Image: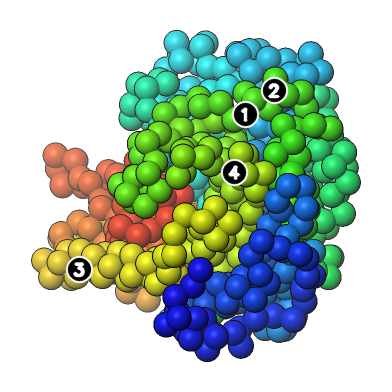
Amino acid sequence: MIKTSIKRTLLAASMMIGASSIAYSADMTEKQLDKFVSYAMAEFNIPGIAVGVIKNGNIKHLKGYGVRDVTTGEPVDGDTMYAIASNSKAFTAAALAILVDDGVLTLDDKVIDYLPNFRMMDPWITAEFTIRDLLTHRSGMGLGAGDLMFWPSTGVNRQEIIENVRHLKMVSGFRSEYAYDNTLYVVAGEVIAAASGMSYEEFVQTRIMNQLAIGDRCRADITTVHEDPNVAEPHVEVDGKLQIAGRLNEEGKPMVIAAAGGIQCSARAMLKWVQTHLNDGAGLMSKTQHDDMWTPQTIQPVSSNDKNWHGTNFAAYGLGFRLKDYHGLKHVSHTGGLLGMVTYTVMIPQERLGIVVLTNAENGSAMRAIMENISQTYLETGDVDWTARYAEIRKRSQERAARQVAAERADANAEALLPLSDYTGLYRDPWFGDVTVSMENGTLYFTAHKSKKLNGPMNPFKFNTFEVIWKDRSFSADAYAMFSTDFEGKVNGLKMKPISPLTDFSYDFHDLDFTKIE
């Protein structure tokens, strides 16, 4: 299935393959898979990957590649736990499905019946907002709205997140458009807690992970994960070199966004989870509830790539899963991304096929290339070098972003309109909280009070706009900060936006609207 020229490139990259493996009889040979993975790891500079494939109820592949930590060199295997990020959303949807089966709630119950302090910006929407709306990315809020409350560091608790939803602006009609959301999944987790009388973590651990006998390598409560000897560390690339990235939660503390993206699982545990879904939820939930999870809830636009590459005609979000047609087959999937980790789960129900790819670097191209290579081999849909294709796409994207940033800087004058001291002071956003703009060694300095990692110098760009250069260089999210003035020319506010168009959407600087307090 691989062209001869590609085979040579793959073979040259085979030195990247880690040691720990478990061999199974397979439709795709282990050697083929090894080459696909090692080629992608070399191309995209990924330290460690775990891959699992299950078909017709049998594990075809389960193997670790590379290392889980570049500083120790410890190898990845099929039991290495990764932060599965937004693949956690399906666990949250499943937990609610179980509560429906228990007769405790329905997905069309109103959120305020379980969380009386929940409010959207619009009172009518608040009254009509259902549990199903929490799961389906159709709230009317913008892409990633509110993510800065917990990304890249957590300075708020779950109750504060619920309280702050009322300040997040609506950018479209309620239930009219798809806009991916993390904040409302945190709210969904608290609905589970309110309805069950158990914490989100306890419910998911007990009713899902322990029920499926994966509780030892799949954790909703990650407070003790740091004590586990086999956990992958997140990595980012800074100046061409891989380094360990910080996690959203402090060691020994729960993940505030567990319900949206805080679960840790191994590839082996994820295969058991996938097989449960390929079996219509048997042993976990009723087929009725499982069918609901895999039923389109919110229509998504079909990308030109999906249409051209896979003949995709429809795309939608279900409950914790994305749905589309893929070469004439139903394709159920989700991706996940946290600082330093990206993961991918795919199921093709008609073929009884499930694939899991877990990576410990912040680069989605590798996992997508590996997933597409595995899929096309099992489904016999083509002979594309997906690693080369995604490498070219990534290169073009980076070049476009660089041109945009360069064009903006060409128009800059690197001078502030006002004396720097005029910009200093305390600024407040209704949901993000306070930031201080201070003077340090003749330079303005930005410090967020709750998001402790968001701090750094502010360099004059032009007029009243500055570039905020984050001290932690692992973020890849430097931002513009534009000060506003009143009619007398005094600074009275601050707005922000990312500098690069490639900045992760969870850095939703554009949603901030600071007022100068003092």
Residue under the image location 63 percent in, 54 percent down: 355
Viewer-side residue, 275 vs 241:
275
The disc label shown at residue 403, or none: 3
Callout 1–callout 3 Cβ contact below 8 Å = no
Q: Which amino acid does label 2 sit on?
A: Gln
Callout 2–callout 1 Cβ contact below 8 Å = yes
Which one is in front in this view, the residue at disc 2 or the one at disc 3?
2
The x and y percentages for residue 237 are 49, 75
Viewer-side residue, 418 vs 206:
206
The answer to whether residue 334 shows anywhere in this view is yes
What residue does disc 4 label? 348
The x and y percentages for residue 480 are 29, 58
Q: Is residue 25 left or right of residue 298?
A: right
Q: In this view, does 227 lie to the left or right of 504?
A: right
Q: What element carries label 2?
A: helix
Spatial separation of the CA atoms under disc 2 and disc 1: 6 Å
Lower sequence index among marks 1 and 4:
1
Q: Is residue 136 left or right of residue 160?
A: left
What residue does disc 1 label? 293
The disc label shown at residue 260, or none: none
Lower sequence index among marks 2 and 3:
2
Residue under the image location 46 percent in, 33 percent down: 316
Q: How crowded is mark 2: few (under 14 residues within 10 Å), some or many (20 or more)?
A: some
What residue does disc 2 label? 289
Q: Which amino acid does label 4 sit on?
A: Ile
Q: What element carries label 3?
A: helix
Callout 4–callout 2 Cβ contact below 8 Å = no
Spatial separation of the CA atoms under disc 1 and disc 4: 15 Å
Q: How crowded is mark 4: few (under 14 residues within 10 Å), some or many (20 or more)?
A: many
